[in-house]
């Protein structure tokens, strides 16, 4: 049974609807890969023009501050103007983060994107995909693929490297292998993100409505890969601790229906030679967010490779704040040889998408970082297809009421 986590033990990230660490830009719906359970309609609309994308960015400028701009889709690397778009995002004041499956990435394109101002990449790689030339039965089988991209970014120099993986009931037991792999490569892998799989058939016994009319929802594809139950953040926490017993989160975003929902659960560990020396504390991450906002006007998302290589410095600086950080420093001082070896910060994030309350309320991510623009308005990117198809978000009512 998964362990109960108390949200009040952690720092509630100060991000909000108008002032956030991240915003989410979708220049295209086209993709060169099909993921099981994908909720994006890759056959519709296609590519936006650069003028349309600029209008979306202007909407963000008018309505929302953020540190980073996630460029997504579809897959943004199939967007014909991706280099120009990255330059545009950079010129308008954001750190461009490219969210991609990586298939279209070549060293030549990577060099052009870096020259245009790309800050980093988030690669979505998991067993829900049928990647060309790769036969992977488990997530561990994909670690060499992940390493290929991490090394490509490291060779280019100065680029943040993150990996997303959607986790279902059927792949939950494979989380420890990814956690261990990431620790071994903490010098070039800066973030691991576990996104919990969702689909309508996992929500419960509900009837769906849009604009007051009952509907048969078919916006989301069902798949056996997704398992038979919706995972929650504590399910993944339990598995992470199998690989890293000292794992401890430091910050979170709650739900719109429940303040104790752990919708985005952040942990940052200090890793040396593949071993976790400890996890930064809530007070440490609070100080980072407060000082970043104080001096730059935005909250931090995605650290640079240089900042993520400052594990020792973080331990020394954090020791001033509280006992938890002093324990990490003590591990360095207990073996002085550790002070001569590099140590790295590495983030582990769990994202728990919408879950439905028994009364039909939908518990969304409060202060969602993945807010996008549609027709000049801000909305949750994960619910975009509902708005496109029905003109509104789908509502849920317990079936027994009907």
Image (spheres, rainbow, N blue to C red):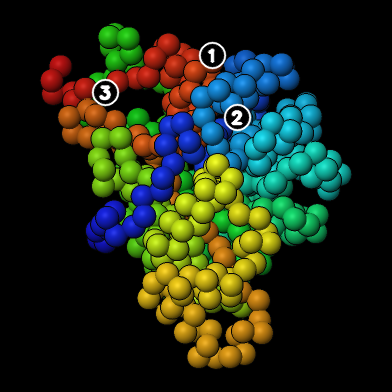
Tell whether 365 sits left or right of 61: left
On the image, which quarter does residue 31 sit in?
A: top right
Contact check, label 3 and label 2, Cβ < 8 Å: no
Residue to which mark 3 is pinned: 396
Q: Residue at x 40, y 55 (%)?
A: 251
Residue 154 in view (yes/no): yes
Closer to viewer: mark 3 or mark 2 = 2
Closer to us: 263 or 291: 291
Tell whether 85 sits left or right of 395: right
* Residue farthest toward the front in the current orientation of the protein: 295
Residue 106 in view (yes/no): no
* Residue farthest toward the left in the current orientation of the protein: 401
Residue to which mark 1 is pinned: 375
Image coordinates for residue 142, horizontal then vertical, percent: 61, 56
Mark closest to the chain's N terminus, 1 or 3: 1
Q: Residue at x 29, y 60 (%)?
A: 9
On the image, which quarter does residue 402 sit in?
A: top left
Contact check, label 2 and label 1, Cβ < 8 Å: no
Mark 1, Cα crowd under 10 Å, few <14 / some 14-19 / many 20+, is few
Give above or below for 118 relative to 359.
Answer: below
Residue to which mark 2 is pinned: 25
């Amino acid at each position: 049974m998964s362990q109960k986590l108390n949200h009040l033990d952690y720092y509630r990230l100060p991000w909000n609807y108008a002032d956030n660490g991240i915003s989410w830009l979708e220049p295209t719906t086209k993709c060169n890969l099909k993921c099981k359970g994908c909720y994006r309609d890759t056959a519709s609309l296609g590519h936006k023009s650069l003028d349309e994308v600029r209008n979306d960015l202007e909407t963000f400028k008018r309505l929302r501050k953020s540190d980073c701009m996630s460029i997504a889709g579809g897959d943004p690397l199939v967007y014909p103007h991706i280099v120009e778009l990255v330059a545009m995002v950079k010129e308008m004041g954001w750190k461009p983060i490219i969210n991609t499956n990586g298939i279209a990435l070549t060293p030549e394109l990577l060099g052009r994107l870096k020259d245009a101002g790309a800050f980093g990449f988030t690669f979505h790689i998991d067993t829900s995909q049928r990647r060309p030339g790769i036969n992977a039965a488990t997530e561990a089988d994909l670690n060499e693929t992940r390493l290929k991209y991490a090394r490509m970014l490291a060779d280019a120099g100065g680029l943040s490297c993150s990996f997303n993986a959607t986790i279902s009931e059927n792949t939950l037991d494979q989380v420890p292998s990814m956690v261990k792999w990431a620790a071994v490569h903490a010098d070039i892998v800066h973030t691991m993100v576990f996104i919990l799989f969702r689909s309508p058939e996992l929500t419960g016994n509900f009837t769906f409505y849009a604009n007051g009319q009952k509907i048969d929802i078919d916006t989301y594809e069902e798949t056996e890969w997704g398992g038979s139950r919706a995972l929650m953040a504590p399910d993944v926490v339990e598995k992470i601790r199998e690989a890293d017993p000292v794992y401890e989160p430091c910050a979170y975003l709650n739900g719109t229906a429940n303040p104790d929902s752990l919708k985005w659960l952040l942990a940052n560990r200090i890793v040396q030679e593949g071993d976790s020396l400890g996890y930064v504390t809530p007070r440490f991450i609070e100080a980072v967010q407060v000082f970043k906002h104080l001096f730059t006007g935005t909250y931090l998302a995605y650290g640079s490779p240089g900042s993520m290589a400052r594990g020792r410095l973080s331990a020394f600086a954090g020791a001033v704040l509280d006992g938890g950080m002093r324990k990490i420093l003590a591990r360095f001082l207990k073996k002085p040889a550790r002070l001569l070896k590099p140590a790295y910060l590495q983030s582990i994030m769990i994202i728990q998408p919408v879950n439905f309350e028994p009364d039909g309320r939908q518990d969304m991510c409060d202060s969602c970082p993945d807010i996008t623009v549609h027709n000049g308005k801000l909305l949750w990117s994960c619910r975009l297809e509902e708005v496109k198809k029905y003109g509104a978000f789908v509502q849920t009512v317990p079936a027994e009421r009907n």
